Image (cartoon, helix red, strand yellow):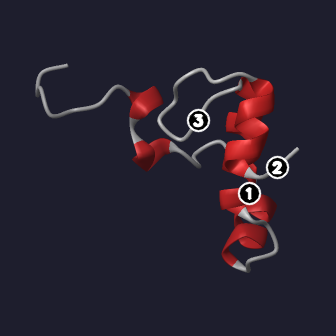
């Protein structure tokens, strides 16, 4: 990286949806997919809280309100 303000591609939100199928993007923009829910579900599946800290699967379920 030449510029210290540049992020690596895997951490750059500009590229977040670059590999997502167009149909899913259309569903998301049409509010047919709840992206907030999916993020909470993924954090729960990893046992992480909203800061990315390990809290365990059961605590993550409680924190994010998903199972």
Check disc 1 and report the residue beneath it.
37
Q: Are marks 1 and 3 in contact (CB under 8 Å)?
A: no
The mark that comes first in sequence, 2 or 3, is: 3
Q: Is mark 2 on a helix, strand or loop?
A: loop
Are there few (<14), some (14-19), or many (20+) residues within 10 Å of tag 2?
some
Query: Depth-wise, is mark 1 or mark 3 nearer the camera?
Result: 3
Percent coordinates x, y for residue 27 in the rendering:
78, 70
Q: Are marks 2 and 1 in contact (CB under 8 Å)?
A: yes
Answer yes or no: is residue 40 visible.
yes
Percent coordinates x, y for residue 58 in the rendering:
80, 30
Check disc 2 and report the residue beneath it.
66
Front residue of this view, candidates 40 and 26: 40
Q: In which quarter of the image is the C terminus?
A: top right
Query: Depth-wise, is mark 2 or mark 1 nearer the camera?
Result: 2
Check disc 3 and report the residue beneath it.
49
Q: Is residue 61 above or below residue 23?
A: above
Are there few (<14), some (14-19), or many (20+) residues within 10 Å of tag 1?
few
Front residue of this view, candidates 65 and 4: 65
Are there few (<14), some (14-19), or many (20+) residues within 10 Å of tag 3?
many
Q: In this view, does 24 lie above or below 14?
A: below
Q: Separation of disc 2 and disc 1 at Cα? A: 8 Å
Q: Quadrant of the N terminus?
A: top left
Residue visible at 80% across and 63% down in the picture: 23
The mark that comes first in sequence, 1 or 3, is: 1
Q: In which quarter of the image is residue 55?
A: top right
């Amino acid at each position: 990286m030449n510029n210290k303000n540049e992020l690596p591609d895997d951490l750059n939100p500009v590229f977040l949806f670059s590999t997502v199928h167009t149909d899913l993007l259309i569903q998301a923009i049409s509010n047919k997919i709840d992206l907030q829910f999916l993020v909470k579900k993924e954090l729960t599946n990893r046992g992480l809280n909203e800061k990315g800290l390990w809290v365990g699967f059961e605590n993550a379920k409680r924190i994010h309100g998903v199972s």
